[in-house]
Amino acid sequence: MSDPILSLTGVHINRGEVEVVHDVSLDVTPGAVTVVLGANGAGKTTLMDGIAGLAPVTKGTVSLGGQAIERLPTYKRALAGLGYVEQARTTFRTLTVEQNLLVAQAGKGDPATVFRLFPELDKRRGLQAGHLSGGEQQMLVVGRALVADPKVVLIDEMSLGLAPVVVQRLMRAVVDLVGLGIAVLLIEQFAHLALDVGANAYVLRKGRVVFDGPCSQLRGDSALLHEAYFGQAPTESETR
Ligand SMILES: Nc1ncnc2c1ncn2[C@@H]1O[C@H](COP(=O)(O)OP(=O)(O)OP(=O)(O)O)[C@@H](O)[C@H]1O
């Protein structure tokens, strides 16, 4: 397996005065999906925000391509190759699909890459983003991260409010993304979908990593997954 492009070592992250993420170390590899799972409130979004510079890393290091980025402002982290698809992020509704991509391009990437990944958007490139379906809007949000030519893309719950068939389509796009050599760090509420496309997984509980291993290990073992999420084995009624 190739060397990690993004590495966290002993990272602590605050929300305001409160420490929410404690002593997290993780590696994200190019050309692979790394999955972050955990119950509501486990600290997944805070972890992503810390990596992206939207929440303060108070201890530890975040290294992107060998460069320490944990003290850089968000825009410099983006310029260093970090893309972030935030939870519930929207598009510029009155701009066309193509204009949305051009605004996000930051003088680097090529909208054609996005249109290859999402032919659905290519067909609608002249349409105002506000007229897209929910799934197409989410494709455009991913496309806006991709068009800045990132090395790593952080994706936080892109399935929110979307039909299962649309979520599956987006997961296929994530697989295509890593096929381009990009590294993806993926938070997904539908654990099984994330584990199907992921190589390695980390499970967070109360802001700490409680499982770190191959997705295949969790994929076939729902009791292990449950225990990692909640710290206890499932009851008999939960396994039925
Ligand atoms: N802006 C904030 N200010 C203070 N506390 C916050 C803030 N955002 C989140 N928290 C708290 O930090 C903890 C972790 O929240 P976070 O959103 O990172 O978890 P999560 O695993 O992403 O949860 P979810 O799956 O519900 O999105 C929670 O206890 C939450 O209440």
Image (tube, rainbow, N blue to C red):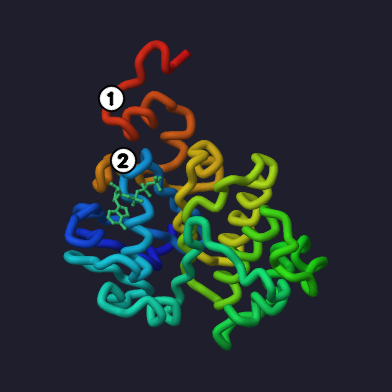
Q: Which residue is label 2 attached to?
A: 211
Q: Which quadrant holds residue 163?
A: top right
**Residue at 58%, 78% in the rendered image:** 104
Question: Do the CB atoms of the residues marked 2 and 1 lie less than 8 Å apart?
Answer: no
Front-most of 228 and 139? 139
Q: Which residue is label 1 attached to?
A: 232
Q: Which quadrant holds residue 231?
A: top left
| Rendered location of residue 29, percent (x, y) | 43, 60
Q: SS class of the residue under badge 1? A: loop
Front-most of 24 and 41? 41
Amino acid type of the residue tagged 2 in the rendering? Phe
Q: Distance between the residues labelled 2 and 1?
A: 13 Å
Relative to 73, residue 38 above or below: above
Task: Check mark 1 vs ligand 1: CB closer than 8 Å? yes or no.
Answer: no
Mark 1 or mark 2, which is nearer the start of the sequence?
A: 2
Q: Of tags 2 and 1, which is closer to the observer?
A: 1
| Rendered location of residue 132, percent (x, y) | 73, 60
Q: Which mark is residue 124?
A: none
**Residue at 39%, 24% in the rendered image:** 223
**Residue at 40%, 43% in the rendered image:** 37
Category of crowding for the residue at label 1, using alpha-carbon neighbours closer than 10 angstroms: few (below 14), some (14–19), many (at least 20): few
**Along the horizontal axis of the image, is 13 left or right of 192?**
left
**Residue at 62%, 58% in the rendered image:** 138
Amino acid type of the residue tagged 1 in the rendering? Gln
**Along the horizontal axis of the image, is 120 left or right of 104?**
right
Q: Residue furthest right?
A: 123
Category of crowding for the residue at label 2, using alpha-carbon neighbours closer than 10 angstroms: few (below 14), some (14–19), many (at least 20): many
**Along the horizontal axis of the image, is 80 left or right of 129?**
left
| Rendered location of residue 103, percent (x, y) | 61, 81
